[in-house]
Image: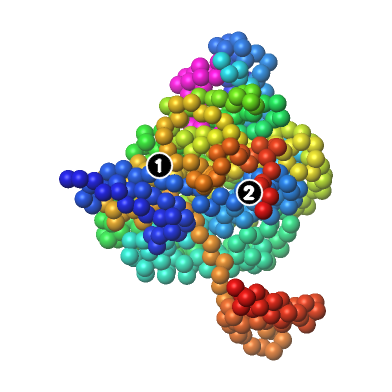
Amino acid sequence: MGTVTIPIGPQHPALKEPAAFSITLVGERILKSDVRLGYNHRGIEKACEQRTYTQDLYLIERICGICSHAHTTTFITASEEVAGLKVPPRGLYIRTLISELERIHSHLLWLGVAGHEIGFDTLLMYSWRDREVVMDILAMLTGNRVNYGINTFGGVRRDFTAEQLAEVRKSMDVLEERTKYYIEVATSEPTLAKRLGGVGSLSHDDALRLGAVGPTARASNIQRDVRRDDTHLVYNELDFKVITDDHCDVFGRTVVRVLELMESYKLIRQIIDKMPDGPVSVKAPRRVPAGEAVARYEAPRGEDIHYVKGNGTDKPERVKVRAPTMANLAAVSKMLEDNNLADVPIVVAAIDPCFSCTDRGIQVSDLGRGRDETLAWGALRAHGIEWWRREAGVDFASLNRKLSQSLAAR
Amino acid sequence: MADEQKLAQALEAKFPVLAGKINLVRPRRMFVEVPAESFRQVLAHLKKEQGFVYCCTITGTDDKDTLAALYHLSDEAGTLLNLRLRVPRDAPVIGTVTDLYPCCANYERELIDLLGFTVENLPPGNRYPMPDDFPRDQHPLRKDWQPAAK
């Protein structure tokens, strides 16, 4: 039988992010595949060289909409090492708490995406509904659902009250109960096992050879977790298990992620129990001495690594970022081999590429008048325009007029 | 840092050329400057004999007179050995390491696009990360690079 090569991407409904796959088929079976990346390259590393360390922190937070805390923590850990700064223990505990909450939100999001990719949309609805619990907790603690802005040079920007931490603990009970149900679904639901079993196989040796990281590697029975191996933050003071599985397929990657959720709940309870009192940050110098450091961090998708080189000024000489998806993409071509074309979306999704969930309506509680109302996106926008006109004297009407005129002139 | 010191001693015994070039920064962090002529042997030794089975990534740096490629190698115990290879800025030629670490293909393509390295024997593949129509003689991470005026 002859071969046919078809392009998937860079823009394709099966992909959540732009990447161009070129898939060579024999009938419905994939013979080989090739991937072209770089469509999201924004030159952030170069931009970091032209901004101060603190400005870089906010830029780096926007590398990924889901792993935002992962990137800022990795970057700031390396920068603090170059600067010789010692973050107070409470600051490190708060960073670790947000880190685990981010893992929960990312893994629950992935579970929904995986369900959606195989036509099991009930799982998507359930897991994303439950994910709202952790999103609300993150918003309550940091003021934002994503891009938390919690890290600063020398510590964290907010301290948490005992009441806030009690709320976190309460929500862990809810999520733990729901996750037990997902573990049951993932391990005993025949449709899931049959659809995911044997799909996207990546043997232990191939995963090692191709440098897979995170749940992708652990589902190929590789005992690799930066939290334990190259311990950072306060993970050396906490007790947790590195979850591995020997299915070496998408089913195994699902099992690893749902079981990791349970470890995260366990970690969060320990963090709250052990969180010491004291300051959450130290004053950071504006200039960072010459020097270099490499920081590693176990992001939800796997190892995140940042290299920072200081040159004695307030701007870094070089910042290098390697996100976990980049490491796992090398293994995707291997995973696709000898699968059906219809398996491409779930195999690609199984390494957990990311997309942002920032677009949303807002629930406004007006306690003074005792009424609740839900603002749609348009109403929220109108409210914002009106607020700026009233409070800050900024009138967007003239800008809108100019915009309409320039559009009409085209 | 006992394990790191033991590893440093073993490396110096095997490769006398590395004497004084190994910097133990803190537990699990080592920086090693390796001369170009010994690079392949040191890298193969680290992978095959010392258990550095995983290359996390390669960082390219522009150090004014030279360009450097920093190979971040990890063993399963979590030690990160950063192996630095310096090459002249006007002839930045390095050999591929994809035979030892197949995951490095895209990291080496990054060195080519962003810093202007030449990587010998790199298997054919797509450019990364710059677009296909981006000029091949423009390397944005070089310190003297300026974006074209609009």
**Chain where mark 2 sits:** A
Answer whether residue B42 is magenta in the image: yes
Secondary structure beneath label 2:
helix
Quadrant position of residue A247: top left
Q: Which one is in front, B101 or B20?
A: B101
Q: Residues within 10 Å of mark 2 (few under 14, many from 20)?
A: some
Q: Would residue B16 appear left or right of A89 to someone viewing this image?
A: left
Answer whether residue B28 is magenta in the image: no
Its colouring scheme is rainbow
Instruction: Residue at the far left: name it.
Output: A1
Tell me which label, 2 or 1, sits earlier in the chain: 2
Q: Which one is in front, A398 or A312?
A: A398
Residue under numbered circle 2: A44
Relative to A147, say whether A395 is above or below. Answer: below
Secondary structure beneath label 1:
helix
Q: Identify the amino acid type marked 1.
A: Ala
**Chain where mark 1 sits:** A
Relative to A216, say whether A133 is above or below. Answer: below
Residue under numbered circle 1: A331
Q: Residue A198: image x %, image y %?
A: 28, 48
Q: Which one is in front, A289 or A124?
A: A289
Q: Quadrant of the N terminus of chain B?
A: top right
Of the two numbered discs 2 and 1 in the rendering, the one whose residue sits closer to the viewer = 2
* Residue at x 35%, y 41% (from the top left corner): A334
Q: Residue A9: image x %, image y %?
A: 41, 55
Q: Residue A161: image x %, image y %?
A: 71, 63
Q: Which stretch appears magenta?
A: B38-58
Q: Which one is in front, A346 or B1?
A: A346
